[in-house]
Amino acid sequence: MYILGLTSFAHEATCALIKDGQLKFLIEEERLNREKHTWKYPANAIRECLKREGITINDVAHITFFWVPKKEIVDNLAHFLKYFPASLNLLAAKSGGNELKFLERVRLMSSIGRSIQQQFDLPHTPQVHFVEHHLCHAASAFFVSGFREAAILTADGRGESASTVMCVGRENHIEKIREIKVPHSLGHFYAAITEYLGFKPFFDEWKVMGMSAYGKDTFVKIFEDMILLNEDGGYHLNLKYFGFHTHGQARWVSDYLIEKLGPKRERTREYDQRHFDVAFGLQRVIEKTGVHLCRALHQTTKLSNLCLTGGVVLNCLMNKKIIESTPFKDVFIQPIANDAGAALGSALYHYHQNLKRPQSSVFEHVYHGPQFSDEDIENVLRAKGVHYYKSENVARDTARHIADEKIVGWFQGRMEAGPRALGNRSIVVSPLHAGMKDRLNARVKKREHFRPFAPSVQEERAKEFFRMPRDFKSPYMILVGEVLEEKRSVIPAVTHADGTARVHTVSKKVNPRYWELIDEFAKITGVPVIINTSFNENEPIVCTPKDAVECFLRTEFDVLAIGNFLVTKEG
Ligand SMILES: [Fe+2]
């Protein structure tokens, strides 16, 4: 039985295709339409999922959607009335992290069936099962966690009205036990400070997390007044600091916040210590709140397993604190924690909860996108007229280039789903010299100096370099560890200012070719660690060989390892 799960008209338009509860494909529309974080109807992603699986829309038994637009209207009436007449501004404000206004977005969501009908020229509007947003997130984690029962925490900007939800999952059933509604939202809190610091909310939260390592505790007390932890295990925002509850994205923070923290940073202005201290204060209270929520969830459920998901759990510093400071024995963090994962979750929820099918799959990797044969790749290389050769051992040849301090594009196998490149659409360089970070930034990534680059390490040798929270593996780069003091000078290019690194542990079983690449690098240098950053340049991660070659030609990469081919710039 095929189920097609969709996210659209909000962050990360996505199509996920499951068959009998197993994920077959998950593709974000941005990878195909090349608009970063696109919200648009995922026509390309749907077409690609069906084509790759060799089926048509008529083979799909059910279509599911990651949101219940009617619920959003009903649930928000109370909010609207409570803040009336200031809340009238919400009708005019942009909504859902994009340029759509509220009513337009709700109309588009409600008529998703008609969009599908039009795309495939169907005689009737197909039935669409709308699934509550946070239950989609919860399902995307629990049903593939391998746990028979678990406590579940989901946290994001917002769903229809909830921003933080606690659930219990048992077998094929998820039960909601508590929810916190907007305007009280960890995601919106983080977005508000992201905007205050001169970045783009819902896009640049990574930057703020990176900045926090350079900050001091100057503003922690003020931040502790912005988010108040309730004795019952919940939290609420002190709204005198914010403006988004009445003005949406047009006014994230209030004059009171500016009075307390100083003026906003203009986008084009340089950074000073105050900005780093603001990021530090925010990060500390987010971590504290995450731990507070999970402790309460444990106390209520007494369960030993925890599932985490929702966009807020992309905060890998918070995840470290949760693992270290709560009593849960095992933790599964869904790596596609953003709304792309909600597309999958809507399909899984329908399959298990509504259709009552038993738990059937365990999430083992993120390689759920398209792949391309050597023949496909060579056709592109020929058409582009680049200088290339076919390698007998692409891992060994590429490792030599990395050891020679070259910047290498690495394009292999199926594209990753989710926000992280994990060794199939990656840029890989040597971590052995501190200067590599600046070189990579100057030539390709153009990132701010305070953003760290992350290491991939052979899973079985991770302990030689990193201290992970409770020795957890980190196959999805969603958890930070500490670089061992004696190794910081060995791999300086991946050691962040606070001594941490966002580690990617690579398993030979899950990604043998990427593991071999690191192994060949270790044979040359003695170090089983390479820098891994996403294969892109201010654009979505590359998807096709054409995207990869064009990015390679446009930027200052030295080498492209694509399938079994090595492409160089010198002819
Ligand atoms: Fe979400």
Image (cartoon, rainbow, N blue to C red):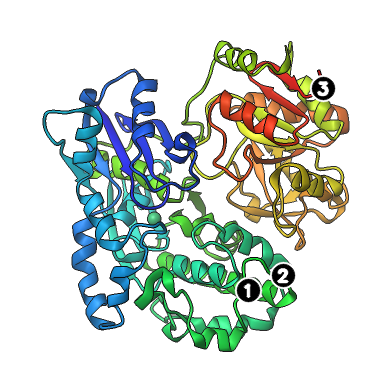
Q: Nearer the viewer, residue 139 or 276?
A: 276
Q: Earlier in the sequence, mark 3 or mark 2?
A: 2
Q: Which residue is mark 1?
A: 265
Q: Which residue is mark 2?
A: 271
Image position of 121 with respect to 74: above or below = above
Residue type, numbered disc 3:
Glu
The residue beneath circle 3 is 570
For the residues carrying marks 3 and 2, which lies nearer the camera in this image? 3
Tag 1 or tag 3, which sits nearer the N-term?
Answer: 1
Quadrant of the image occupied by residue 82: bottom left
Residue 406 location in percent, x, y?
A: 82, 33
**x 36%, y 45%: residue:** 40
Residue 386 in percent (x, y) is at 70, 18
Residue visible at 48% across and 78% down in the picture: 253
Q: Is mark 3 within 8 Å of ligand 1?
A: no
- Decide: few, some or many residues near mark 3? Use Cα within 10 Å; few <14, some 14-19, many ≥20: few
**Residue type, mark 1 in image:** Arg
What is the three-letter code of the residue carrying label 2?
Tyr
Which quadrant of the figure has residue 302? bottom left
Question: Where is the N terminus found, in terms of image quarters?
Answer: top left
